[in-house]
């Protein structure tokens, strides 16, 4: 009776001659550089547009509350500034902390909502470039 054992190493397929040749294939540095630049540009535009959207929402809300009147908007902002200046230091700290947390949650939520479309667009753009280089 023969004792036969199969280990994880035994399950790894041995490289064929073609796989060995493909490993030593030259790297297309231009395509790699172009793909990296594309990913960085697309990611930067995604991050910048997400931040601009989040920073524009309070302005839109304040303008809507003010009835699209800039005089009323600045009167409300002045009132908010007066209340902030006259508040206790601990209240100021909590207000600033609440604003920071709300900003992070809103930015993260919007980024998560926009992420699938961004990844789909990035995949499409990268595959367009790969078809041109093939």
Image (cartoon, helix red, strand yellow):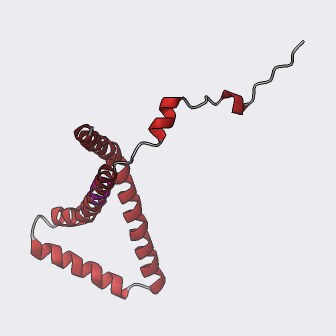
Q: Is residue 11 left or right of residue 115?
A: right
> What residue is drawn where x is 39% and y is 46%?
26
Please say if 65 is above or below 36: below
Report the magenta residues as a range: 38-44
Q: Is residue 109 left or right of residue 80?
A: right
Quarter holding residue 128:
top left
Quarter holding residue 89:
bottom left
Query: Which quadrant, please, contains the C terminus?
Result: top left
Please say if 117 is above or below 93: above
> What residue is drawn where x is 40% and y is 63%?
104
Query: Which quadrant, please, contains the N terminus?
Result: top right
Please say if 17 is above or below 91: above
> What residue is drawn where x is 57% and y is 32%?
15
Where is residue 97? Give x, y as percent.
44, 73
**Number of numbered discs on residues:** 0
Q: Nearer the viewer, residue 104 or 95?
A: 104
Residue 43 counted in the magenta span: yes
Where is residue 78? Give x, y as percent.
22, 81
Residue 97 counted in the magenta span: no
> What residue is drawn where x is 28% and y is 61%?
54
Q: Is residue 96 left or right of residue 1?
A: left
Q: Is residue 10 left or right of residue 115?
A: right
Where is residue 40? Give x, y as percent.
32, 58
Where is residue 130? Give x, y as percent.
28, 40
Q: Nearer the viewer, residue 105 or 63?
A: 105
Please identify the residue farthest to the right as the structure is shown. 1
Q: Nearer the viewer, residue 103 or 32?
A: 32
Magenta segment, prevailing SS (helix, strand or loop):
helix
Q: Nearer the viewer, residue 36 or 115?
A: 36
Quarter holding residue 44:
bottom left
């Amino acid at each position: 009776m023969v004792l036969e054992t199969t280990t994880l190493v035994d399950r790894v397929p041995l490289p064929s001659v073609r796989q060995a040749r493909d490993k030593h294939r030259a790297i297309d540095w231009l395509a790699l550089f172009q793909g990296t630049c594309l990913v960085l540009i697309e990611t930067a535009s995604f991050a910048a547009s997400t931040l601009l959207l989040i920073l524009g929402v309070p302005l839109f809300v304040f303008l809507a509350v003010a009835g699209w009147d800039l005089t009323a908007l600045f009167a409300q902002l002045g009132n908010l500034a007066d209340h902030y200046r006259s508040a206790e230091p601990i209240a100021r700290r909590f207000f600033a902390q609440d604003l920071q947390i709300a900003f992070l949650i809103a930015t993260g939520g919007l980024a998560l909502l926009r992420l699938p479309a961004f990844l789909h667009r990035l995949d499409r753009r990268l595959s367009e470039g790969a078809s041109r280089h093939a």
